[in-house]
Image: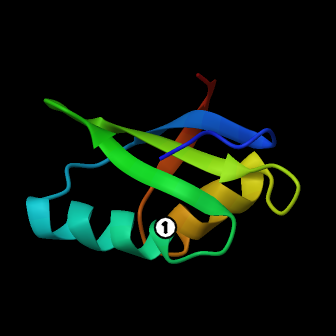
Amino acid sequence: MSKELNDVELVIHINETLGESRRDELTSSLKSKEGIRSAEFCPLRYHLMRVSYDRVNLTSQDVLHHVNDQSINAQLIGPV
């Protein structure tokens, strides 16, 4: 996937333990949101998630709210 000029990548800390199926649901949900380019958990650090999004259409708070809307307790760590 090529990085677009307006893309920002951030890290989100998941404050709870999610099983594999729940992690898959969350990444799929994020990827389906317009403006999100990619979403993945860091290998072997399943409490950390990297999300790349288009800053023209979304803010970091929009991304975090989408995670929280999935009934997941999370917080922003910051840009990569």
User: Residue visible at 62% across and 55% down?
Assistant: 64
User: Residue visible at 47% across and 47% down?
Assistant: 1
Residue 16 shown left or right of residue 69 in the figure: left
Q: Please state the horizontal and vertical placement of residue 41, each as a whole percent of the image.
A: 30, 43
Q: Quadrant of residue 78?
A: top right
Direction front: furthest residue: 2
Residue 68 shown left or right of residue 17 in the figure: right
Direction top: furthest residue: 80
**Image quarter in which the C terminus is found:** top right
Query: Which residue bears the numbered disc 1?
Result: 30
Q: Please state the horizontal and vertical placement of residue 23, each as a whole percent of the image.
A: 24, 60
Q: Please state the horizontal and vertical placement of residue 29, each as a whole percent of the image.
A: 43, 75
Residue 10 shown left or right of residue 58 in the figure: left
Count residues near mark 1 (Cα–Cα under 10 Å), then give few for <14, some for 14-19, many for 20+. Answer: many
Q: Please state the horizontal and vertical placement of residue 20, each as a whole percent of the image.
A: 11, 60
Secondary element under disc 1, as helix, strand or loop, is helix
Image vertical order of residue 55 relative to residue 80, above or below = below
Give the camera-side residue of 68 and 28: 28
Q: Amino acid at mark 1?
A: Leu
Q: Quadrant of residue 8?
A: top right
Give the camera-side residue of 1 and 6: 1
How many numbered marks does the figure carry? 1
User: Residue visible at 71% across and 43% down?
Assistant: 4
User: Residue visible at 66% across and 51% down?
Assistant: 53
